[in-house]
């Protein structure tokens, strides 16, 4: 536990240090989120106006604001004080209902402060692989969602991006060589070119990642492996063409087992 806490503190410190750069780089969104990740997330979420939505590890609030524009009543949290400052600054003139809180997604006590059975949906957009420990979060989400709620998360696809890319070798646009997939591992990654400080990255193979969800009572209800639209592949083939054959992102939807009983 001491080691996990130490790593988690490093994650916190790195994201605080990178926050201003990250906010300036991402802004309101980027191509990857706007045209690959967010459409898949929104398809599986199917947000209805007035639903209460929990945005976990919200960063500078880009997806929280999108959820609010779709009609959700959003509670968004992150453990980086600096990223939350960026999120609040960008939300001043944003339409919709958003509340931001400082909460550590690895801390069971802090997560318990959110209540029980009070969210119709929860989202974790491209953040689970940056968390030192996801067990407390999954346990909490199994209690936070209403009985017919759903959880949607997106991650860097673990089958094709071992340690986010450190152990991955692209073979042109035809294939990818992945090393050391089967065991969980920790490394240091750069999410975007030019990132000032590498952040800890946590590789979780599917058996491990899904197993944590299964253990707390979630059932896999939807899975997408989105690829870039054709126009984006044509416009920037050196960057996007390879992802047309081998998905960089995986998006999943989960529901509580109780929904399917009786």
Image (cartoon, rainbow, N blue to C red):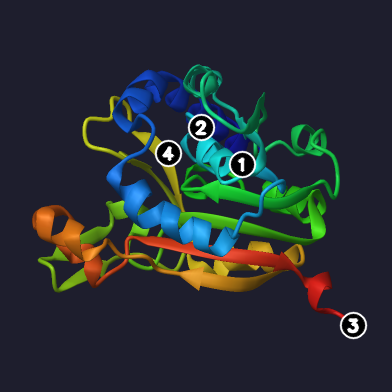
- The residue pinned by badge 2 equals 61
Label 2 sits on a secondary structure element that is: loop
- The residue pinned by badge 4 equals 200
CB atoms of marks 2 and 1 within 8 Å: yes
Circle nearer the N terminus (4, 2)? 2
Q: Position of residue 44 (x, y in %)?
A: 55, 64
Instruction: Say if residue 173 shows up in the picture.
Output: yes
- The residue pinned by badge 1 equals 55
* Number of the label disc, if any, that sits on residue 262: 3
* Relative depth, front residue between 65 and 198: 65
CB atoms of marks 3 and 4 within 8 Å: no
Circle nearer the N terminus (3, 1)? 1
Q: Is residue 12 left or right of residue 99?
A: left
Circle nearer the N terminus (2, 1)? 1
Give neighbour class at mark 3: few <14, some 14-19, many 20+ (Cα, 10 Å).
few
Quarter of the image with the C terminus is: bottom right
Label 1 sits on a secondary structure element that is: strand
Q: Position of residue 79 (x, y in %)?
A: 59, 28
Asked which quadrant contains residue 115, the reply is top right
Label 3 sits on a secondary structure element that is: loop
Spatial CA distance of label 2 from label 1 is 9 Å
**Location of residue 127 with respect to 260 vertically, above or below:** above
């Amino acid at each position: 536990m001491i080691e996990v806490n130490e790593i988690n503190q490093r994650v916190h410190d790195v994201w605080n240090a990178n926050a201003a750069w990250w906010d300036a780089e991402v802004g309101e969104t980027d191509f990857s989120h706007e045209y690959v990740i967010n459409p898949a997330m929104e398809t599986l979420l199917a947000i209805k106006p007035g639903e209460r939505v929990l945005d976990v590890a919200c960063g500078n609030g880009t997806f929280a604001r999108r959820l609010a524009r779709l009609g959700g009543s959003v509670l968004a949290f992150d453990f980086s004080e600096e990223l939350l400052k960026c999120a609040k600054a960008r939300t001043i003139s944003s339409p919709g209902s958003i509340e931001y809180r400082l909460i550590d997604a690895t801390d069971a006590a802090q997560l318990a402060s959110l209540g029980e059975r009070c969210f119709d949906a929860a989202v974790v957009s491209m953040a689970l692989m940056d968390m030192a420990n996801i067990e407390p979060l999954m346990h909490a989400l199994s209690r936070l969602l209403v009985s017919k709620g759903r959880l949607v998360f997106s991650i860097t696809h673990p089958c094709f991006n071992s340690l986010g890319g450190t152990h991955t070798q692209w073979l042109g646009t035809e294939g990818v060589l992945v090393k050391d997939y089967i065991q969980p591992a920790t490394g240091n990654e750069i999410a975007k070119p030019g990132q000032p400080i590498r952040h800890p990255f946590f590789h979780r193979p599917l058996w491990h990642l899904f197993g944590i969800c299964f253990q707390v009572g979630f059932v896999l209800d939807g899975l997408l492996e989105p690829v870039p639209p054709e126009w984006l592949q044509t416009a920037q083939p050196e960057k996007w063409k390879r992802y047309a054959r081998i998905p960089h992102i995986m998006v999943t939807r989960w529901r509580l087992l109780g929904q399917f009983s009786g």
